[in-house]
Amino acid sequence: MFTGLIAELASVTALRRNGAGATLAIRSRLAGQLEEGDSIAVNGVCLTASGVEADVFHAEIMAETLSRSSLGDLKPGAKVNLELPLRSSDRLGGHIVQGHVDGTGTVSAVREDGPIGDRPARILEVEIDEQLERYLVEKGSVALDGVSLTVSALREHGFAVSLIPETLERTTLGGVREGDLLNIEVDILAKQVERLLEARA
């Protein structure tokens, strides 16, 4: 389980297709904290470390994950958001994020939202599949590329989030442009409630 608070902005060193799946290599200072078999969230996708070197770790990506996320589009040199799993003693600073991506969304607008001090803030608008729209509520939580964010407004076929300077500087969202694909994970609590209500009906 994760919280959506990014620990590092790391670099992809390789993405190799292996049949229907792929192997990803990432250079990261967090590699020293990983052992083979450990989980790590990469752009919001929970992956398992299949190999660890001094400052690089490798992870295998299943075909299902490639079809639901943007990981298959990564190129060497691309920046990715990393987060280690939550320890039971850690603060839950974001929201409950599983790393089980529900799909992707397309950035439909990026606009400045006036500075906070001398640093910029932005509003990001994202279009998503209509099947995911029902899980979003204004002031609810959503994870974009693994970053825990608050839905600031609902839009037709999508939503908006506000990005503070800290988020822009510490995550890949600072470099997002119109047309970019982002990994979306909606709130697991909303999905659980829906399932319970369906069963009761």
Image (cartoon, rainbow, N blue to C red):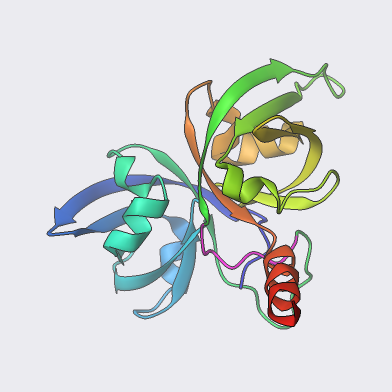
Q: Residue at position x 54%, y 64% from top?
A: 99
> Residue 32 lies in what quarter of the image?
bottom left
Residue 37, picture quadrant: bottom left
Residue 201 shows in this picture? yes
Name the quarter where the N terminus is drawn. bottom right
Q: Is residue 97 magenta?
A: yes
Q: Residue 160's x, y, as percent?
A: 73, 32
Q: Quadrant of residue 90?
A: bottom right
**Can I make out residue 27 in this image?**
no
Q: Looking at the picture, does residue 59 appear above or below residue 131? A: below
Q: Nearer the viewer, residue 38 or 71?
A: 71
- x then y, percent, for residue 52: 31, 70
Q: Residue at x 71, y 54 (%)?
A: 135
Q: Work out whether 198 lies above or below 184.
A: below
Of residues 61 and 108, the one drawn nearer to the viewer in this rendering? 108
Picture layout, residue 66 above or below residue 198: above
**Residue span colored magenta:** 95-101
